[in-house]
Amino acid sequence: MKVLILTNLFPTPWDPLRGAFNRQQFERLGQLHEVDVITAVDFRERLGERRGDVHADHLRTDYFVFAFPPRIGRSLHALCWLLSLWWQRGRQIRKARYDCLLVSWAYPDGAAVGWLARRLGIPYVVKVHGSDLNVQANHVLRRPQIRSALTGAAGVVAVSRALATKAVALGAHASNVHVIYNGVDASIFSPESRAPSRARLGLSTYSPLLLFVGNLKASKGCLDLLEAFPALLAARPLARLIYVGTGPARTALLERAKALGCLDRVEMAGAVAHAELGDWFRAADVLCLPSHNEGVPNVVLEAMACGTPVVATRVGGIPEVVPVYAGILVPPHQRQALSAALIEASARRWNHKRIAAHARGFRWEDNIRQLDAILRAAVAESAVTAGASA
């Protein structure tokens, strides 16, 4: 088949590390079909400097600049997204004659692609991830646009059961909603003794290491983690907290760490290429991701694949993938509960082999097999409908 993927969650020259989970999935899909990926680039980001090249196997990649009125008119973003795409890539899309569209992110991407697919007369599948439904759909003017995108789709792919339930509640047909957990690349994320990974990263062999991997923004709970960290330091004075990632909260984190008197025990490692994250997970005693909302974050699956236990919040699909023997879950925004969980996790004797064995169940091969079946079914159903109406 000839498939066009439209999304904002994919690497670009301005953010080469963005959407690593999508890159992995789409590359594998590209081994089965002829796949083009066109990525939306925020016009403000496009004005910045390029930070690297996009490397994607088995795919043809392109981008368009998503122009919209900043700070206002969020309910108009789907229309702006569609007009930006059509103005810059419309002729190219019409000429290509795709069999189906796959859109990754419900708003504004999914809402816009719903309109586009109807104009082109081809089926589309929407992949939803977390805050695109959990947050965006709570806004009164965006909710009906998301509902329309879901109800008009030939299939909805959710990364967790919790998100699938949310999609159905928003109006998606239950028979069209499919849960497909993301996979883990076992060639990168696998168990190994802690010492070699720490040596490669230049880290002390003996200091307890608490790791955060993700965007440095408040909704990911990075500030909550910092507030909870001093309690762990009181119990484990040699502990270190390392943040891997970049984002708008970086300055606030450093300022707050200084105010809390733990700046010397906190490190900002910056952005790390996906292929290099394995050593960070293996080096850590615990991965902590206290997000306020989530789908199923790949960093949790990848950390467990390395045998590393997880402290995370009980939100989205996280409880579906973290069993009691692999981590401790707490309510979001509860910093005292988070402190207690970190202290407990640092003292518990974890079965690292069992944790890694559990995570090996999340296979990209299974993910792609299911996604391929959904796309094929969408195209077949569209052909039957077209034949019946001819």
Image: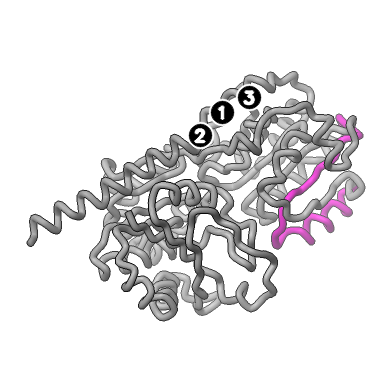
Query: Disc 2 marks which residue?
Result: 363
Q: How many marks?
A: 3
Is 253 within the magenta? yes
Residue 264 at x, y percent in the picture = 92, 47
Q: What amino acid is at disc 3?
A: Ile
Q: Residues within 10 Å of mark 2 (few under 14, many from 20)?
A: some
The relative height of residue 209 versus residue 154 in the rendered view (above or below) is: above
Q: Are marks 2 and 1 in contact (CB under 8 Å)?
A: yes
Residue 183 seen in render: yes
Query: What label sits on residue 64 in the rendered view?
Result: none
Query: Disc 3 marks which residue?
Result: 355
Residue 134 at x, y percent in the picture = 47, 51
Query: Disc 1 marks which residue?
Result: 360
**Pick the front one: 22 or 337:** 22
Q: Which of label 2 and label 3 is nearer to you? A: 2
What is the spatial separation of the Cα atoms under label 2 and label 3, in whole angstroms? Answer: 15 Å
Q: What amino acid is at disc 2?
A: Arg
The relative height of residue 188 versus residue 220 in the rendered view (above or below) is: above
Q: What amino acid is at disc 1?
A: Arg
- Please give the range of residues in magenta: 234-261
